[in-house]
Amino acid sequence: MSNPDTPDVIVVGGGIGGLGAAYSLSRKGLRVRVLEQAPAFGEVGAGIQLAPNCTRILDTYGLLDEATSLGVVPEAMVMRDAVDGVELTRLDLRDLEARYGYPYLVIHRSDLHGLLLRACERAGVELVTDARISSYENTDAGARVTLASGETEEAAVVIAADGLHSVARQLFADDEPVSSAYVAYRGTVPAEHPRVGGVDLSEVVVYVGPACHFVHYGLRGGELLNQVAVFESPKALAGEEDWGTPDELDEAFAATCDFVQGGLPHMWRDKWWRMFDREPLMTWVHDRIALLGDSAHAPLQYIAQGAIMALEDGWVLGEHVARRRTADGVVDWDAALADYQAVRPEHCRRVVTTSRQWGELWHLVGVAREQRNALLRARDTYDYAFVDWLYGPTALFPTDEPAMFEPIPLDAAQVVAV
Ligand SMILES: Cc1cc2nc3c(=O)[nH]c(=O)nc-3n(C[C@H](O)[C@H](O)[C@H](O)COP(=O)(O)OP(=O)(O)OC[C@H]3O[C@@H](n4cnc5c(N)ncnc54)[C@H](O)[C@@H]3O)c2cc1C
């Protein structure tokens, strides 16, 4: 008989990935305890983009209406050249919603995190703070974690959603986060500020430029303009410790159009995010310990799928737990974790490697930039070949995983000399 004080599942990390998994598993009737190292649950940063492969899951969870009421459902996603500001291509997000059945949503990170936290509270998830895990081990009955305090906790399964610098990942790989030498500045501007005058808050806009890019979109029902400025740091390339500083920000965007440069004074200049990812990892399950979210597959953010993958991981795990439960309620964890392992690493490998390629495409210079621009201008607004593999229903089995798109070589472009 199980001990009522012992949860079925321990989730380490209360970020978007950990809370999403905790909610998914508690919906399936499991007792879940989340152990978070911070003194309070929360998220730092500003906006986050949620594509239909995520809003579909939020809808299944009964959380989409709340998410939509907190965010913005934009009309279009537009790509422009950061140097001359000219539009290169666009997605019609109303048509995209009709195609995939769910909206493209942008939301403040803290609003998404808050709604997951409230959902966990309602579902009876035990939420514990000030609990830093320093080691993991499998046991005869499941798995055990040891806290920095020296205490231990056990459950049938431990899900490690402990982020980019995951301790649990050390059980699976002897690797480190990979620096891209790019850094992101973020910031929000109130809608009544002159900077926002003339900005269409119903659009998600990305300006792609030489070794830099700039993104903006509306947040909180159009009350805020969210801005992100990303660039390659010369100091990082030179191996200096102190990289990504505000002087580098201004210098990196010196060749961009007035609109982009006008956004730079509005970035938060006292904090910046160095962009790291991880090499793809193809094994995430070690007996009763499993990785989830950034600990398994931290990507560069160029196709905006990091948090989405984390939420998909939790949903997939929940579905397999439900499939693998016998009539008397006992979960065959080995089978459920094997199902999770069979489908998620390959999908996330594709996202992590495509995100890197996307970043390279955005940041091209010289002739390659001209070729990219020609290819993007030639793209039909209603051509979904590049997103079909991402935005459809999340695969539960490897055979459901859609085919990848065929990349178009840059030299296929018809560049018109001016
Ligand atoms: C600039 C930028 C823009 C992005 N834009 C998007 C976007 O538009 N769409 C999108 O889907 N994704 C986006 N992402 C990616 C997304 O933010 C991450 O992939 C996602 O937040 C990862 O969630 P996580 O829960 O796996 O990890 P984290 O958010 O890192 O959470 C890990 C949690 O574990 C806790 N923890 C860590 N170690 C321990 C320990 N030892 N013991 C206990 N607790 C521990 C941490 O305190 C933290 O709360 C973006 C990322 C960046 C940097």
Image: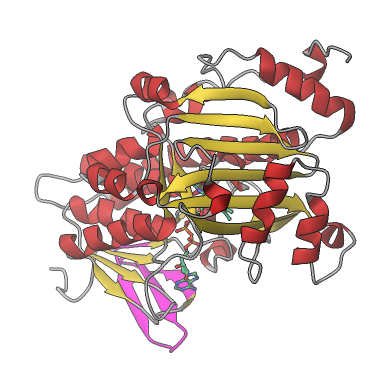
Identify the image's colour scheme: rainbow, by chain, secondary structure or one colour.
Answer: secondary structure
Q: Quadrant of the N terminus?
A: bottom left
Seen from this angle, which residue lies furthest left?
Answer: 328
Q: Is residue 174 above or below residue 392?
A: below
Frontmost residue, 417 versus 289? 417
Seen from this angle, which residue lies furthest bottom?
Answer: 149
Percent of width and height locating residue 233: 80, 57
Number of marks in the rendered image = 0
- Residue 41's quadrant in the figure? bottom left
Which residue shows up at 42% across the image and 35% down it?
74
What secondary structure is the stretch in magenta mostly built from?
strand
Frontmost residue, 370 versus 264? 264
Percent of width and height locating residue 411: 83, 16
Q: Is residue 388 above or below residue 52?
A: above
Is residue 287 something one can see in this rendering? Answer: no
Is residue 96 something one can see in this rendering? Answer: yes
Q: Quadrant of the C terminus?
A: top right
Relative placement, left or right, of 7 versus 302 is left
Relative placement, left or right, of 143 versus 184 is left
Which residue shows up at 32% across the image and 44% down it?
315
Frontmost residue, 28 versus 264? 264
- Residue 338's quadrant in the figure? top left
Q: Report the magenta residues as a range.
A: 135-158
Percent of width and height locating residue 36: 40, 73
Which residue shows up at 22% across the image and 73% down it?
6
Magenta stretch holds residue 251: no
Frontmost residue, 116 versus 103? 103
